[in-house]
Amino acid sequence: MSTPFSVSSRSALFTQLSDSLFDVLIIGGGITGAGILLDATARGMRAALVEMQDFAAGTSNRSSKLVHGGLRYLKQLEVGLVAEVGRERAIVYENGPHITTPIWMLLPILADGTYGWWTTSFGIFLYDRLAGVRRHERRKMLRRKEALAKEPLLRPDVLGAGYYVEYRTDDARLTLEILKAAVERGGIAVNYARAERLLYEHGRVVGATVCDGLTGRRHEVRARKVVNAAGPWVDELREWDGSKSGKTLHHTKGVHIVVDGSRFPLQNAVYFDVPDGRMVFAMPRAGKTYVGTTDTDYDGDLARPRMTVEDVDYLVRCVNFMFPSVHLTSGDVESGWAGVRPLIHEAGKSPSEISRRDEVFVSPSGLISIAGGKLTGYRKMADKVVSLVARELAKAGVGPFPDCSTAHIPYSGGDVGGSARFPGFVARMADEGARLGLDWDAALQVAQTYGSNTDKVFAVLADAGGQAESYGLPRDLYARLVYGLEAEMVVKPSDFFVRRTGMMYFDMDGVRRYRDGVLACMADWLGWDAAVYAEMEAELAQSLEDATVPLGAGDRPRPANSSPHAG
């Protein structure tokens, strides 16, 4: 099942990159770059994307994993932003119901909290109307007994709670499915392809030198327009271009921690006040509960932000503030992740106060850079950039190209007839998986994860599912791995464990149990020699270390109201 998004296609893709003239070259394979690639290919542009790490390896895999309307932005009077992203989340849900799930969320009301009863009621009412929330998902207001019945772990002195719908997602798979949809339309996307310098002719940017991170070979990629969608590295590319002036990025770090559901048995998603004035999410998922996020200034390694003792202690205190009966300790934390937010700097504002709006910069050389923004608003950001590219190309006599149409394009795996038909589709596919010998629950999880691509995952079982036992892997995990190699450009073991399955965050025991089998299977598929095997084994060990809670968390108590995360 070799596809244009197969790891075995990389050599041919680099040849295409070297031999073609593209209408647009996109540098950066996070959610923003993915959205731009899909929009450009949907309009008929010849488009390519290069990513120096794995797809979504940066910010787009380290969010709160919510496609949400940004209720807290009402507090900052960002009414337009709330309205825009609220409408966009409905589009994301319809285009990819397999990676977006509506969930009811509690907003507890405290006597000294951010919002009182009437403020909360009006705020969520306004939020629902601005976001265009469907009638059956509009907010409800719960009195104290009702709120505690919904979530018994809440602190007993809550006055009540708002109850409203948000949308949970898998941020890495959302990015991946958008990229796959673009590739299915003729786009080119390659991971571990680092842009090393920009190419110029007569003072205009005309492409980039790209290095294949696996072979070390360099390729000159030519394009009429170059888009810098490098997330936290946007300013680095602007420096290459000599155009870093005016507004610049402000990096902040956000950390999430994961606790087993048996230790923190949260029944509902909760968005709650903490003593320093911030608000934090606690979310049940896959038998775990994850909590985040922090918001602190960051000037460290952009490729490898880490949780610190202070980060973990802070979030543990946040849990114990709202859920005092849990008595959480840092020792209960199984895993976590840290991400860097590339925000537009605003002088005098704390990290939590900086707007999440996006900004587009066009340099004298013609380099187009986009920074800031939110996961939920990726499609509007892409529309803004690609429409600009289309206008610029028209000036050069290339085109014309139509307007944005991505509101109506399902993601890869999203062709299931819309969100209303998705539950029935999943049930049918789970039955099919059971007929192939999978445990019904495992088949259900595959169907929920891969949507209309589930039949391709099941085809692996039909063709070679018996090989799973030779690697000591469950049949469903083996099928997902082979599909990842053939259709999702899995290059390294962390690509699979972190961004294709999420196991690194939500099933660390499974990673440790099956890592040898996954390494052995990948070695056979990709023809690794002993040196490459050792390199990949070390790479996976590094990913495990990054997701592990730092030693010493909880050993340095601070005054109850002391926090490095105030905002």
Image: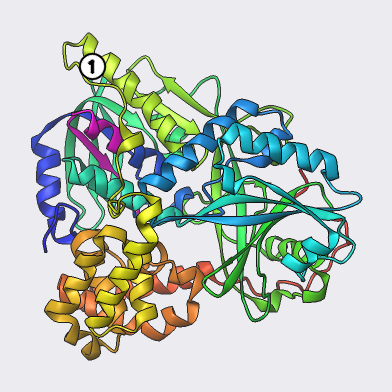
Outermost residue toward the front in this view: 136
Q: Residue at x 22, y 38 (%)?
A: 48
Residue extent of the magenta highlight: 37-53
Q: Which amino acid type corresponds to the residue marked 1 in the rendered image?
A: Leu
Left or right: 277 in relation to 84: right
The location of residue 193, given as percent across then percent down, is 26, 48
Question: Looking at the rendering, which quadrant does residue 145 occupy?
Answer: bottom right
Query: Helix, strand or loop at disc 1?
Result: helix
Left or right: 506 in relation to 529: right
Neighbour tally class for label 1: few under 14, some 14-19, many 20 plus, Cα within 10 Å: some
The location of residue 359, given as percent across then percent down, is 50, 26
Q: Can residue 299 be seen in this view?
A: no
Q: Is residue 406 visible?
A: yes
Residue that badge 1 annotates:
393
Left or right: 256 in relation to 28: right
Q: Residue at x 57, y 60 (%)?
A: 306
Residue 475 lies, with reference to residue 284, above or below; the image says below
Residue 54 on the magenta segment = no
Q: Quadrant location of the C terminus? A: top right
Residue 473 lies, with reference to residue 269, above or below; the image says below
Residue 31 lies, with reference to residue 422, above or below; the image says above
User: 247 or 85, which is in the foreground?
Assistant: 85
Q: Quadrant location of the N terminus? A: bottom left
The location of residue 281, given as percent across then percent down, is 66, 56
The location of residue 37, given as percent across then percent down, is 28, 37
Question: Looking at the rendering, which quadrant does residue 551 occupy?
Answer: bottom right
Left or right: 530 in relation to 539: left
Q: Residue at x 55, y 75 (%)?
A: 287
In this rendering, the count of numbered labels is 1
User: 170 or 537, which is in the foreground?
Assistant: 170
Question: Looking at the rendering, which quadrant does residue 401 occupy?
Answer: top left
